Image: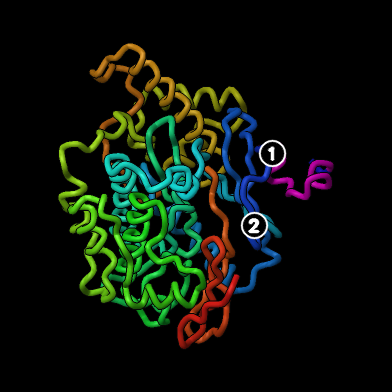
Amino acid sequence: MAARKSKHGYDGKIAGLYDLEDTIGRGHFAVVKLARHVFTGEKVAVKVIDKTKLDEVSRSHLFQEVRCMKLVQHPNVVRLYEVIDTQTKLYLILELGDGGDMYDYIMRHNGGLDEKVAKRYFRQIVEAISYCHKLHVVHRDLKPENVVFFEKVGLVKLTDFGFSNMFAPGKKLETSCGSLAYSAPEILLGDSYDAPAVDVWSLGVILFMLVVGEPPFQEANDSETLTMIMDCRYHVPPQISKDCKDLIGKMLQREPSKRATLSTIIAHPWLNDRDLTPMATFLPLITKEMISDEDQSYVVQKMVEGKIATREEILQSIEKNCYNHITATYYLLIERRLRKHQQHEHHTQNQQPSSGSLRKQSTPSPSRSAKPHLEPLMLSPRGDAFKTCRRPPAVTVVCSPDGVLPRAA
């Protein structure tokens, strides 16, 4: 293990557990590596954060990201399997998507997606954010680059909770952060703001991009883009349906109090018409309550035979919702059985649940997370002048106590 650490620069805690392969993402303080879980052979994404490069503010928000990802367990949120904390690095073991991110997908469709396709994906994003808000978690960096495709199961999943935070209903937040093209006016002004409303604005930008193929606020320079956002000036092409245009307009409201709520969005006619393609029959595995006793016994026995841990240690880690190598191995094995079960169901075209069904009927519980899209792990609390926030392609946003001063990238 010492040789491996010397050769690759990674700590002994991860050597032997994961084989790190190609780099699939890069940020100021972190890289995302494609990796293989040694015991199961399953592919995962490993976000490697260099803690030595983080200041106190960035470090505190890094652990806020981990806290929020542990809290949010949803079929449309990238799963966090394991957290490995060493003296110099933090390793986040994440679910790996198979279809790239939504930004690249949109760019491959000139003029936007067909509305039937767009609403299927948009509804999944809305459901993920609605679930986050019910747990009092605000994302604050919603954009197509942070939505990952899982094509084999027909899902998109939200990722990159680097700017996420907890909020109290009715209490405003004051940290200016995000990407210029997707940020709400109140964020750019440096005002205190209602947390759910800023995510709703970003959802409006995402929906516009899905159906039009380009951002609503994207001019030749940042000053012009900022002016368009503040004036809430954008043009919806005539081919966009009346209902879709209406929903976009309800989200892209200059005044947060006039902006649509998530319940309004979910109930909107555009998301509830009869031509909406049904989602996959099987949603991803979320919690231990969804696993049958038979399958749990099988997986636990495999882990004991593989000397991962004793039966007691395995059951204890699962019960405590740990994010260690025991639970990571357990869920990777369970998910493999889920995939085999789905393939069998599809092959036999048997719509009735079998007696050996992997999943129990259960509602996801608020306690658990591909190519994660990396950006700088910097935030800009009001009062800390001129710290650089995240940026979309070709845009840099500089935050100050007096608001945002855009500059050329």
| Residue that sits furthest to the top in the current view | 348
- Residues 365 and 347: in front is 347
**Image x and y of residue 258, in percent:** 21, 72
On the image, numbered disc 2 is attached to which residue?
A: 30
In the image, 398: left or right of 189? right
Q: Which residues are magenta?
A: 3-17
Q: Is residue 147 visible?
A: yes
Amino acid type assigned to the residue bearing label 1 in the image: Glu
Q: Quadrant of the N terminus?
A: top right
**Image x and y of residue 120, in percent:** 30, 41
**Image x and y of residue 256, in percent:** 27, 74
- 165 above or below 176? above
- Residues 153 and 86: in front is 153
- Secondary structure beneath disc 1? strand
On the image, numbered disc 1 is attached to which residue?
A: 21
Taking the magenta stretch, the answer to whether it contains residue 122 is no
Residue drawn at (57%, 65%) of the image: 377
| Residue that sits furthest to the front in the current view | 238
Residue drawn at (49%, 55%) of the image: 160
Q: Quadrant of the C terminus?
A: bottom right
- Residues 129 and 169: in front is 129
- Secondary structure beneath disc 2? strand
Q: What whole-number distance in Å separates the C-alpha atoms at marks 2 and 1? A: 15 Å
In the image, 106: left or right of 44? left
Q: Is residue 48 visible?
A: no
Residue drawn at (51%, 46%) of the image: 323
Residue 398 found in image quarter:
bottom right
In the image, 253: left or right of 214? left
Other-residue count near label 1 (Cα within 10 Å), few / some / many at <14 / 14–19 / ≥20: few
